């Protein structure tokens, strides 16, 4: 039998993960670590919340926009306003469909200078984001697909500064800023970003130095109990923060108004893809919204479970759901009718049983993501 995983892309650190006994799963066309031997999701999750963990997230997309007016072009297409920030800063933004206002992808943009912006889309959407930008780019602006050319490591947790400093990398810069440095003769971007809610950094470096960089950080982290963590723990960590996942909580049929991501839209900008649609929807009010839900009992929500006020009043469905290792209870995100108020109690159909959940505003836990 042919192993289906052979058709999947692999991280440049695949052999390192195998040596650590990783259990692998498919993520956006890549074969990536889900969890590691001797650890497991709860242990890896807890290590990030209480100490420090390291993730390989090289499956994330990488699209470079270069040339005269590159930043101006990005600003006229993606939702957020680069005018709110300057070079050396990162920003969460959205690629919206111009016809529907739906979310094609959510992206981190790294504003190097007015002629250079690095975009990090989700793995499954990298090609589509690249295609749309390349098709719209004016003369002189290049849109380059570097999906497999870089390694991305996320060092996350309260001890992340100590680990990276011990590895000789710059730390201490503000949240949503980045510093360009060198490692083994290659350029490395050290970003104060992450998807866990804890203080941490993401390292973007050429794939050819991936193993050296991983080894250096792992060696430096030994004194701080640095724990390799897989994408299973990354998912529980982001759910505790209420961070949406494209393909589950947001997608082409969900607008930023429905996802409550209006803060990632430059409403005063004269142009961005989907502007007319989302402005009109904002004025009339979205018909549904993304909320947090927390179990009042022992139930654990899962995607596509229906949510109702009674058997006859369907409100929506769960989009993400998990057991929170921090809270020791079931939590999730859900798309529900806009009429639903925070603190309301709703019923979730958990395998045929009506379980009571409370509607809450994420995050579900207090974290250190913005600590200076």
Image (cartoon, helix red, strand yellow):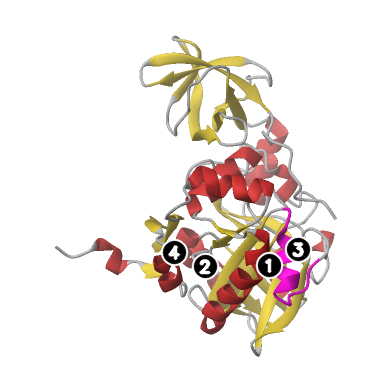
- Classify mark 1: helix, strand or loop: helix
**Pair 2/4: label in front:** 4
Label 3 CA crowd tier, 10 Å (few <14, some 14–19, many 20+): many
**Pair 3/4: label in front:** 4
Residue 58's tag is 2
Q: Quadrant of the N terminus?
A: bottom left
Answer with mark 3 or mark 2, whichever residue precedes in sequence.
2
Q: Residue at x 48, y 28 (%)?
A: 301
Label 1 CA crowd tier, 10 Å (few <14, some 14–19, many 20+): many
Q: Which residue is mark 4?
A: 20
Q: Nearer the viewer, residue 52 or 272?
A: 52
Label 4 CA crowd tier, 10 Å (few <14, some 14–19, many 20+): some
Q: Which residue is mark 3?
A: 161
Contact, CB < 8 Å: mark 2 with mark 4?
no
Is residue 198 one of those drawn in magenta?
no
In whole angstroms, how far apart are the C-alphas of marks 3 and 2? 21 Å
């Amino acid at each position: 039998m042919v192993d289906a995983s052979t058709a999947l892309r692999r991280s440049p650190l695949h052999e390192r993960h195998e040596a650590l006994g990783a259990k692998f799963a498919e993520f956006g066309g890549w074969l990536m670590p889900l969890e590691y031997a001797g650890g497991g999701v709860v242990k890896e999750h807890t290590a990030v919340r209480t100490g420090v963990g390291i993730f390989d997230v090289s499956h994330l997309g990488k699209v470079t926009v270069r040339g005269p007016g590159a930043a101006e072009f990005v600003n006229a297409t993606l939702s957020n306003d680069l005018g709110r920030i300057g070079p050396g800063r990162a920003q969460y933004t959205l690629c919206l469909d111009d016809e529907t206002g739906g979310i094609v992808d959510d992206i981190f943009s790294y504003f190097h200078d007015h002629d250079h912006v690095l975009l990090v889309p989700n793995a499954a959407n990298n090609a589509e984001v690249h295609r749309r930008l390349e098709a719209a780019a004016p003369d002189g602006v290049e849109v380059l697909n570097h999906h497999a050319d870089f390694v991305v490591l996320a060092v996350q947790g309260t001890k992340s500064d100590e680990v990276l400093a011990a590895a000789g990398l710059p730390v201490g810069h503000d949240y949503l800023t980045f510093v360009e440095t060198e490692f083994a003769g290659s350029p490395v971007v050290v970003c104060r970003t992450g998807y866990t809610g804890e203080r941490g950094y993401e390292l973007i470096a050429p794939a050819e130095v991936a193993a050296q960089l991983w080894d250096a950080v792992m060696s430096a982290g030994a004194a701080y109990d640095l724990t390799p963590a897989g994408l299973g723990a990354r998912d529980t960590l982001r759910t505790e923060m209420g961070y949406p996942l494209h393909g589950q909580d947001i997608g082409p049929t969900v607008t930023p108004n429905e996802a409550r991501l209006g803060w990632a839209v430059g409403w005063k900008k004269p142009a961005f893809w989907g502007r007319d649609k989302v402005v009109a929807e904002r004025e009339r009010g979205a018909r549904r919204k993304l909320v947090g839900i927390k179990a009042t009992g022992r139930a654990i929500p899962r995607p596509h479970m229906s949510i109702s006020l009674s058997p006859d009043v369907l409100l929506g469905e769960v989009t993400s759901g998990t057991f929170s290792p921090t809270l020791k209870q079931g939590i999730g995100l859900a798309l529900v009718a806009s009429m639903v108020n925070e603190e309301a109690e709703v019923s979730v159909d958990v395998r045929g049983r009506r379980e009571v959940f409370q509607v809450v505003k994420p995050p579900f836990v207090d974290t250190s993501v913005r600590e200076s």
